[in-house]
Structure formats: structure tokens, C-alpha cells
Image: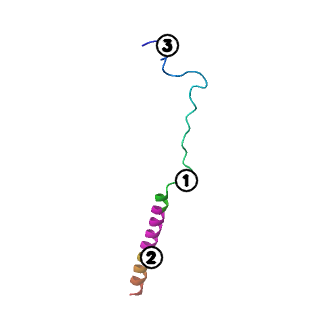
Amino acid sequence: MPDRPPTDLPSGPSAAPAPTRYVENKPPRGLYVRVFIYVVATHVLLAFMSLLVIIAKSR
């Protein structure tokens, strides 16, 4: 291994700009859709189970 840096790479403070990091500020839209579906599905299931309990108590 040579002890010196390769000559094809630039060196110095202005050699390359600092890499920018991509930071996502909001979650993807699919996440909102899935959460909405899960919330609606759980409420429908709860309503169905409540209806079954009400029907069973009335008999």
C-alpha cells in the first residue's frame, strides 16, 4: 500500500462539497391510508361485536 494519497482525487478544503442528507419531513401517504383503514375496520368490528352482545342480552 502506498503511503501517499491517490493523485486522481482532489484534496483540500474546497475539494468537494459536503454531502447533503435527505431528511423526510412527513410520512408517506400510504401510511395515512393504512391507519385510516385500520381505524375504520376496528370500529366496524367493535360495532358488530357490540350488536352481537345486545342481541344476545335481549334473548
Residue lying at the far right of the rendered structure:
13
Q: Could you tell me residue 27's position as x and y percent?
A: 52, 54
Three-letter amino acid code at disc 3?
A: Arg
Tell me how far mark 1 sits from mark 3, CA to CA.
Answer: 45 Å
Which residue is painted at 45% across and 65% down in the image? 38
Which secondary structure lies at badge 3? Answer: loop
Q: Main secondary structure of the magenta part?
A: helix
Mark 1 Cα-neighbour bin, 10 Å: few <14, some 14–19, many ≥20 = few
Quarter of the rendering occupied by the N terminus: top left
Three-letter amino acid code at disc 1?
A: Lys
For label 3, the residue is 4
Q: Nearer the viewer, residue 43 or 36?
A: 36
Tell me how far mark 2 sits from mark 3, CA to CA.
Answer: 73 Å
Which residue is painted at 54% across and 43% down in the image? 22
Residue 20 appears left or right of 3: right
Residue lying at the far front of the rendered structure:
8
Three-letter amino acid code at disc 2?
A: Ala
- Tags 1 and 3 touching, CB below 8 Å: no
Which residue is painted at 48% across and 20% down in the image? 8
Mark 3 Cα-neighbour bin, 10 Å: few <14, some 14–19, many ≥20 = few
Q: Could you tell me residue 3's position as x and y percent?
A: 48, 12
Quarter of the rendering occupied by the C terminus: bottom left
Q: Could you tell me residue 42's position as x and y percent?
A: 44, 69
For label 1, the residue is 26
- Camera-nearest label, 1 or 3: 3
Instruction: Indicate how the structure is coloured in the image.
Output: rainbow
First-in-chain label (2 vs 3)? 3
First-in-chain label (1 vs 2)? 1
Magenta residues (range): 33-46
Which labelled disc corresponds to residue 7?
none
Which labelled disc corresponds to residue 47?
2
